Image: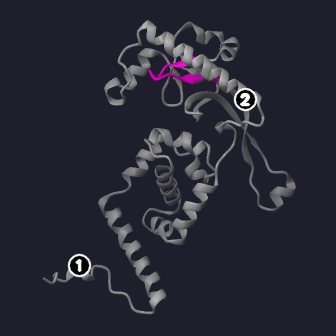
Amino acid sequence: MATGQEILHLKLMSYKNKGKTYVRAYRNKWIAPIPEEAALGKKGRSVPAVQIQVGVIQPSGMVKMSSKFLSLHPEFAQQDWYYLNHDLVDENTFFDQLPAESVGFPNKKPVEENVAIEDTAADGDLNDEAADDENPEDKEEGNFKFFLPHYALKGLAIHQGIVSALAEVFDSKHAEQWISYAIYQILKGGSADCYSDWAYHQILPRVAQNLSAQEVTKLLRTCTPEAWDEFWAKRFKTLQKKQAEVDGRIPPEFGSGFWLYPLRS
């Protein structure tokens, strides 16, 4: 059975707007820098070339297709489609790959009356979303990128020596990935599968921007007990150095301190 990406030849993403989760099909194109920009060391950039509103994701995981999308792609009207791993799949594939007991979805299609309720609600959601698309003063979340929250938190992490400690323990590439994933957990929280959706709306270093769920899992596996201990040892020494600069004293060696002395009664 062909998937949504195979039929459309486009990538698929989900995003939230006004409390609802929508699916969008898109293709980006690469814009090379003009000679003046290249002379200044500026690189090219990726910009959206095609964007198609697909529909809204129902509580069951099924996607309610928008009427405009179905008019462009009537082949999607022949069956129910579900959103899974940035793709549209059929019902059997969805429940085979995403067991109901692990995520709380029903393990069969909703009964007809529930479908009717979901369809009615989804129609209203899609109409609202379409109105947002037509109103330039009400820009939806998928059309711009955030930078300030990540920029502020990363600046704090750099100032505190966290990024440099990560680079010493892992390497500079993984340090960028670690700090971006940590900031994702602080600002939004969620599974590795949702990181790429969050990253799409952020201005991040390229090594962190394109981090897939599988790569996040591999990244987390690099945090062995030995690496974790080494990171905290470097953090301790960094804090000692900063404190010494403040009060002018020589800090104690790592491993010493008040916790090594017996408590007084």
Number of callouts? 2
- Residue 67 vs 246, above or below: the answer is above
Task: Give amino acid for label 1.
Answer: Trp
**Snapshot quadrant of residue 92:** top left
Q: Residue furthest left?
A: 265
Q: Which residues are magenta?
A: 54-64
Circle 2 residue: 133
Distance Cα–Cα, label 2 vs label 1: 60 Å
Does the image show residue 80? yes
Residue 103: x percent and y percent?
A: 37, 29
- Residue at image x 47%, y 81%? 242
- Residue 4 vs 209, above or below: the answer is above
Question: Mark 1: which secondary structure?
Answer: helix
Does the image show residue 1? no
Which labelled disc corresponds to residue 259? 1
| Nearer to us in this view, 137 or 50 | 137
Residue 226 placement, left or right of 172: left
Does the stretch in magenta take in 57? yes
Which labelled disc corresponds to residue 62? none
Task: Give amino acid for label 2.
Answer: Asp
Quadrant showing the C terminus: bottom left
- Residue 46 vs 77, above or below: the answer is below
- Residue at image x 53%, y 30%? 86
- Residue at image x 45%, y 46%? 189
The disc, 2 or 1, on the residue closer to the chain's N-terminal end is 2
- Residue at image x 38%, y 75%? 236
